Image (cartoon, coloured by chain):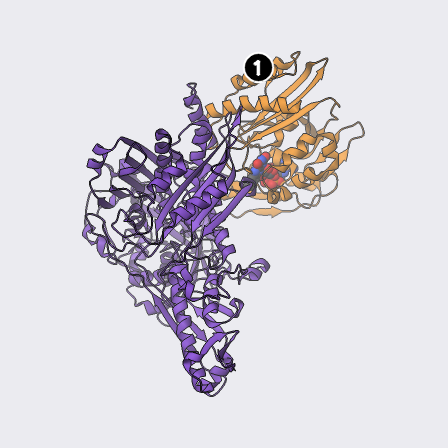
Chain colours: A purple, B orange
């Protein structure tokens, strides 16, 4: 498609964001700033224990506080929603704890008051008596027979047919188990020259978006409900709230504004069901806004245990691989089963391996729920397979870059799922990495107590499927244009990127296109803003919608100018003919409606083709609309006396199809690298009996400016994708795949130690170093 | 957050009069950067906060003492301290430490008095001020008294300041021209984190030997403290790597490290060893 556009005007330009000025001067709308007349504030009383039966809830003292309007518990919820369990994959999460609690911090009661401080104080006074039950926090232990079980039975959501068979299953914490089988992995190991087996772990981390979660609900007309929410998935919220209330979707309106970051935290239902129920109970608008601290108990990134076994020939060809991954989903499934499955099938990496067996387990534990976090499980897997790739390469005496080239899965090859690979530019990414890292030049590894090393890694993701997007482009009476779509701009520049596409089709400058904020009463359905899918899916829908309305304009112009349709195109803010005739969009509207008025609507939808994988083997001829390949290279300096790692250089390279806005693409890559740098070096939620010991930004540190590598770059390779809008693929997550193993590989290069668990805190590094020198540090 | 009374007296006398010797729910508040965190965590529920923000005069800023040295008002913000030419000339170790003490937003409002009165063992300035021989003047309706910096923090979040007392100012004696000073801050998490270990050193040399030495550690132990054994090991020793390493071992042996999310006790002991040596070396 891109090549049929030899003269692109708006695509491929690093245009500034449409909303930059408004963001800088503070006039941009955030739901966080919304106040409704007569509104009550809700504050949540949360469980103090990890697992237990609720014996009694005493709200007396809370209700006695002057200014408290109501205290809402599960019993009140039942009056509104007889079946108050929600979730995108499983209907397992009660709006408020019902009968039992399954993690520390689980919402048990909501105190409503006009003054948020009163509500907060009273929330502390709710007293709950529990009968504690045994809890389990480790994902491997929780999956074992005999572990304390949190959910009496599995409750898959009806929407996913592939989960139906799980309904009613009892006595297990394994919510979902998925498999991929290609060839005979065990026979492969028997034939291999060498077999390598390792277990890798990643800890739990949190999104830390700057705008904490916030939702408001108000009654609307006689029988409607409006929810204002900082959500990445307004369409899902509408249908799920409709389902919970037993209402048709058209009675629920969900609107968002710009989001102060999302990263996967603000998906599906978070506070929306609570505010909806509260507003219906008290018949007043209700706002619930979390503190940064409460978010640690709301949604996290999966910790994971990855057992990986690989057989290789002595000349460095991987022939057989088995990966067994336990995903710590916490107390409620959220989107965990999808993370497990959709990322799980990529666990063999971007490699061409003859026999592959992949097992993935979505496991309930008594930690706070885990869901999507920028990368959807991919970075946990890349951590394992790219650390192991280096260990194998080094054991065989093969250069790590060369080892990856020898095993790369290229377009035309067959992925472990059986899908023929298209658009996976491994060679181009490796070439760019080698060039940026000056890989073939000698490298100074330092001396004394400061040692230097370098490493690289590549990782792959399959864009989640099946999903669907719809967009509409409106041309108003004066000829001005607006895109109606439910893609949520949370800082990733989707507004500008989508506007560039519509502008390209319509021959307008990007700045002339306006985006309507997602509002389910106004903007069409979109699955959600997640998984790097918007540029591709919504991009295609917007292009189709723009083409639709463009064609309508051209037909009007053909009639008005009495020229052949084939003579006309949209260019330079008008419809122009080859012969030089010109009609503005406003003129066309006047021609069509006989006055300066009316609306033209172009509509476009996009649903990529997809074939559901076989339940037993995970095989599918068509598993994903596009592959995302990301590579990283790191240079580090290790202080051997403290264990502190300084990342001096970090390069992120992505295969993006085509960069619609190169500056935005680079920023996505470097910002993802910074986020992953924190997860790699020091971010970790520290738990004790399910309690988060560092649930605040004072103690859970995220990278600051002083932590950035001196040399931090994002770079991309462009090979237009046949199905992408103008050849583009998504890029929001690609930058998180590979920095962690690249840094850990550099650590090995520098000092020869291997750490199997993220993050690489100075203490872990020093302990491993001292271990390797046979003078271990005392235990504690 | 609970309901409480907020009073904003205009003078130090009024402020002191509003405190209550027997009620720990009545407290002063200066920059509020530390206190608010405790209130949000429900670790502190005030009945009355006595805000010091309207107090003026010598409670703010850095002043020369007639007899030498500096007097620093308790309400001086950490940013003003960081930028003070007087401080930079008298004790560059303080100016330098401030640059990585939390972040600009916190430093712009946090005060020296709040920093010292909080009693948090993870603060950067107490070990430095201990080695510089600083003293703190506290006032109450009962009058003034002096507290040596090393006696100020007595335990984990416990200070020797009474409920009805306020820090008025901090006195920094004039430093001998030949004093070697250094502060080594080690962060295990982000670069702008609290220290995992902070080590301050001060020593003088004559004829190639160390004639006087003060070492203090913060963040590693339940309160900031001087390291007497390490100091003693330095007196009379050459200012060279071997003596520094001996002092580092003495320091590591002497402490009872406090484990927290930033490091186990064993790791902190090791970090004290490394950073005492580095601080002494960099102080040269
Ligand atoms: C995000 C963050 C990061 C930080 N990082 C660091 C760091 O890296 N290193 C570091 O050293 N510190 C760090 N701090 C702590 C910071 O130094 C303190 O919060 C600050 O110095 C406290 O000063 P304040 O004026 O805000 O005190 P307040 O919060 O106002 O008061 C603190 C305590 O002191 C009492 N108090 C205040 N003034 C007086 C007075 N004149 N007399 C008697 N009692 C008084 C109050 O009653 C209260 O108990 C950090 C803080 C934050 C919020």
Q: Is residue A291 above or below residue B64?
A: below
Observer able to see residue B180: yes
- How packed mark 1 is, by other alpha carbons closer than 10 Å (few <14, some 14-19, many 20 or more), is some
Q: Quadrant of residue B209?
A: top right
Give the labeled residue for mark 1: B246
**Count of marks, rendered view:** 1
Q: Is residue A27 above or below residue B212?
A: below
What residue do we see at 42% from left, 34% from top? A745
Q: Quadrant of residue A769?
A: top left
- List x then y, in percent, for residue A390: 38, 34
- List x then y, in percent, for residue A89: 28, 53
Observer able to see residue A697: no
Find numbered disc 1 in the image and state the secondary structure of the residue it sits on: helix
Left or right? Give the position of A338 relative to A649. left
Q: Quadrant of the C terminus of chain B?
A: top right
Query: Depth check: A212 or B201 in front?
Result: B201
Query: Looking at mark 1, is its residue's CB closer than 8 Å to ligand 1?
Result: no
What residue do we see at 33% from left, 48% from top? A410
Q: Chain of mark 1?
A: B
- List x then y, in percent, for residue B50: 62, 43
Query: Depth check: A57 or B65 in front?
Result: B65
Task: Name the quarter showing ligand 1.
Answer: top right
Q: Residue lying at the far top in this picture: please name it.
A: B236
- List x then y, in percent, for residue A527: 35, 60
């Amino acid at each position: 498609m891109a090549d049929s556009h030899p003269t692109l005007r708006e695509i491929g330009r690093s245009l500034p964001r449409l909303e930059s000025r408004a963001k800088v001067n503070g006039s941009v709308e955030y739901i966080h700033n919304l106040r409704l007349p007569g509104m009550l504030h809700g504050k949540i009383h949360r469980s103090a224990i990890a697992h237990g039966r609720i014996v009694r809830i005493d709200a007396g003292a809370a209700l006695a506080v002057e200014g408290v309007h109501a205290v809402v518990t599960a019993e009140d919820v039942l009056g509104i929603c007889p079946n108050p369990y929600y979730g995108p994959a499983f209907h397992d999460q009660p709006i408020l704890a019902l009968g039992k609690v399954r993690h520390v911090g689980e919402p048990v009661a909501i105190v409503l008051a006009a003054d948020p401080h009163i509500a907060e104080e009273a929330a502390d006074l709710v007293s709950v008596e529990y009968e504690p039950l045994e809890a389990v926090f480790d994902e491997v232990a929780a999956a074992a027979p005999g572990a304390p079980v949190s959910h009496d039975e599995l409750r898959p959501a009806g929407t996913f047919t592939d989960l139906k068979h799980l309904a009613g299953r009892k006595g297990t914490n394994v919510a979902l188990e998925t498999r991929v089988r290609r060839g005979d992995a065990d026979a492969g190991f028997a034939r291999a020259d060498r077999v390598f087996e390792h277990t890798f772990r990643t800890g739990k981390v949190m999104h830390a978006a700057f705008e904490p979660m916030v939702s408001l609900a108000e009654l609307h007309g006689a029988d409607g409900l409006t929810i204002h929410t900082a959500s990445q998935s307004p369409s899902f919220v509408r249908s799920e709230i409709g389902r919970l209330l037993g209402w048709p979707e058209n009675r629920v309106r969900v609107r968002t504004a710009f989001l102060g970051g999302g990263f996967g935290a603000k998906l599906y239902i978070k506070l929306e069901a609570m505010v909806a129920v509260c507003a219906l109970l008290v018949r007043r608008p209700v706002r619930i806004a979390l503190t940064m601290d409460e978010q640690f108990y709301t949604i996290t990134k999966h910790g994971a245990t990855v057992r990986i076994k690989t057989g290789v020939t002595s000349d460095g060809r991987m022939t057989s691989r088995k990966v067994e991954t336990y995903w710590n989903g916490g107390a409620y499934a959220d989107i965990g089963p999808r993370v497990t499955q959709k990322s799980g099938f990529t666990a063999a990496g971007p490699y061409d391996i003859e026999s592959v067996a992949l097992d993935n387990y979505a496991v309930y534990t008594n930690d706070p729920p885990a869901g999507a976090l920028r990368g959807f499980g991919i970075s946990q897997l890349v951590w394992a397979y790219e650390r192991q790739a280096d260990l194998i390469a080094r054991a065989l005496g093969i250069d790590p870059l060369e080892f990856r080239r020898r095993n790369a899965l290229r377009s035309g090859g067959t992925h472990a799922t059986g899908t023929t690979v298209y658009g996976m530019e491994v060679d181009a990414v490796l070439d760019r990495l080698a060039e940026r890292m000056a890989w073939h030049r000698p490298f100074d590894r330092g001396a004394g107590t400061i040692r230097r090393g370098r490493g690289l890694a590549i990782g792959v993701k399959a864009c989640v499927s099946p999903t669907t997007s719809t967009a509409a482009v409106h041309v108003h009476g004066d000829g001005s244009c607006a895109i109606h779509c439910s893609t949520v701009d949370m800082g990733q520049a989707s507004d500008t990127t989508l506007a560039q596409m519509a502008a390209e089709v319509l021959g307008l400058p990007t700045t002339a296109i306006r985006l309507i904020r997602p509002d389910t009463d106004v903007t069409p359905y979109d699955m959600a803003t997640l998984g790097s899918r918007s540029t591709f899916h919504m991009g295609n829908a917007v292009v189709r919608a723009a083409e639709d309305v463009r064609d309508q304009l051209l037909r009007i112009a053909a009639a008005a100018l009495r020229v052949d349709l084939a003579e006309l195109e949209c260019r330079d803010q008008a419809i122009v003919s080859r012969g030089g005739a010109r009609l503005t969009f406003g003129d066309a509207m006047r021609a069509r409606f006989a006055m300066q008025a009316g609306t033209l609507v172009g509509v476009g939808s996009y649903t990529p083709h997809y074939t559901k994988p076989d339940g037993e083997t995970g095989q599918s001829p068509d598993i994903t609309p596009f592959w995302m390949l990301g590579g990283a290279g790191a240079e580090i300096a290790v202080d051997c006396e403290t264990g502190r790692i300084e990342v001096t250089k970090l390069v992120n390279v992505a295969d993006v199809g085509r960069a619609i806005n190169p500056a935005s693409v680079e920023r996505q890559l470097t910002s993802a690298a910074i986020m992953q740098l924190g997860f790699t070096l020091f971010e970790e939620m520290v738990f004790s009996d399910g309690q988060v010991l560092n649930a605040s930004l004072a103690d859970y540190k995220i990278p600051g400016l002083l932590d950035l590598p001196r040399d931090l770059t994002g770079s991309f390779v462009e090979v237009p994708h046949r199905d992408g809008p103008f050849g583009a693929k998504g890029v929001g997550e690609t930058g998180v795949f590979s920095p962690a193993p690249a840094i850990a590989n550099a650590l090995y290069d520098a000092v020869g130690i291997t750490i199997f668990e993220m993050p690489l805190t100075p203490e872990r590094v020093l302990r491993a170093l001292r271990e390797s020198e046979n003078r271990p540090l005392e235990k504690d | 957050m609970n309901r409480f009374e907020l009073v904003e007296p205009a003078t130090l006398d009024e402020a002191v009069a509003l405190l209550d010797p027997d009620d720990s729910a009545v407290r002063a508040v200066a920059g509020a950067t530390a206190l608010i965190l405790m209130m949000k965590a429900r670790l502190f529920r005030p009945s009355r906060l006595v805000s010091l923000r309207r107090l003026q005069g010598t409670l703010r800023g850095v002043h020369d003492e007639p007899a030498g040295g500096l007097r620093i008002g308790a309400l001086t913000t950490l940013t003003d301290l960081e930028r003070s030419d007087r401080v930079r000339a008298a004790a560059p170790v303080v100016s330098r430490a401030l640059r990585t003490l939390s972040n600009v937003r916190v430093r712009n409002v946090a005060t020296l008095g709040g920093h010292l009165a909080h009693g948090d063992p993870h603060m950067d300035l107490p070990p430095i001020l201990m080695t510089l021989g600083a003293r703190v003047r506290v006032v109450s309706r009962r009058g003034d008294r002096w507290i040596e910096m090393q006696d100020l923090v007595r335990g984990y979040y416990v200070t020797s300041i009474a409920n009805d007392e306020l820090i008025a100012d901090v006195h920094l004696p004039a430093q001998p021209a030949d004093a070697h000073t250094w502060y080594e801050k080690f962060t295990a998490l982000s670069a702008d984190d609290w220290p995992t270990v902070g080590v301050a050193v001060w020593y003088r040399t004559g004829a190639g030997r160390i004639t006087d030495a003060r070492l203090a550690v913060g963040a590693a132990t339940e309160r900031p403290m001087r390291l007497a054994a390490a100091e003693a090991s330095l007196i009379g020793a050459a200012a060279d790597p071997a003596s520094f390493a001996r002092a580092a071992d003495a320091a590591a042996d002497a402490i009872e490290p406090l484990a927290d999310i930033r490091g186990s006790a064993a790791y902190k002991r090791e970090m004290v060893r490394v950073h005492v040596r580095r601080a002494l070396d960099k102080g040269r």
